[in-house]
Amino acid sequence: MHWHVFAIGKPKLGFARDGIEEYATRLRPLAAVTIEYLKPGAGEEESAALLRRSEGMYRVALDERGAQFTSRDFAAKVSQWEQDRIKDIALLIGGADGHSAALRGKADMSWALGKLTLQHELALVVLMEQIYRAYAIKAGLPYHRD
C-alpha cells in the first residue's frame, strides 16, 4: 500500500518541517509514503486540486467532523485496508479554509485527528506520527504504550 499525502501549501514553520521529515524517515523501512504540497488558492480551488491529484485513490479527508480513532483502532484500519488490497491511499489536508462540501462528499472517509481544529502544518506532523505509530503497532515495535 502506498500512502499519498496531499497538503495545501509548503510548511513554513521550521519545527513542522523537521517533524514531517523525522516521521518520513522513520516510515521508510515500514511503508511507502509520498508527500506532495499543492499551491494555495481559494477554498474551492484548493479542494478541486486535491480531488484532481487524488483521482483513482482511496480518499481520506482530514477534517474535524470526521471519525476519530484510537491509535490501535487506526492500526487495525490500516490492516483492514491492506486486506482489502487498497493500493493507494490519499490523505487530504486542506488549507486555512478546510475542505469544500464537494471534497467531503467525494472522500471515501473523513478522519478527525481530534476535536480540535489544527493548523494544517501541525496536522501534517500529527498525521505522519500517527501513520508511523500504526506501523509500529503492527510490527510490534516498542514505540506505542497502552
Image (spheres, rainbow, N blue to C red):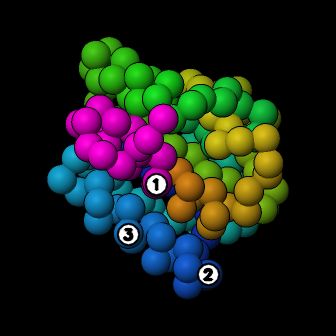
- Residue furthest left as drawn: 29
Task: Indicate which disc residue 13 carries.
Answer: 2
Q: Earlier in the sequence, mark 3 or mark 2?
A: 2
Q: Secondary structure at mark 2?
A: loop
Q: Quadrant of residue 122?
A: bottom right
Which residues are the magenta region? 128-146
Q: Secondary structure at mark 3?
A: helix
Q: Earlier in the sequence, mark 2 or mark 1?
A: 2
> Does residue 76 belong to the magenta stretch?
no
Q: Which residue is mark 3?
A: 22
Task: Indicate which disc residue 128 carries.
Answer: 1
Name the residue rendered at 44%, 61% in the picture. 36
Which amino acid is tagged 3?
A: Glu
Above or below, 18 relative to 135: below
Q: Where does the N terminus fall, quadrant-wise?
A: top left
Q: Quadrant of residue 51?
A: top right
Task: Indicate which disc residue 23 carries.
Answer: none
Mark 3, Cα crowd under 10 Å, few <14 / some 14-19 / many 20+, is: some
Which amino acid is tagged 2?
A: Leu
Which amino acid is tagged 1?
A: Met
Q: Quadrant of residue 25?
A: bottom left
Name the residue rendered at 48%, 35% in the picture. 146
Relative to the observer, which residue lies in front, 3 or 118?
A: 118
Relative to the observer, which residue lies in front, 41 or 36?
A: 36
List x then y, in percent, for residue 69.
Answer: 59, 29
Above or below, 116 relative to 39: above
Q: Earlier in the sequence, mark 3 or mark 1?
A: 3
User: Magenta stretch mostly in which secondary structure?
Assistant: helix
List x then y, in percent, for residue 134.
Answer: 39, 38
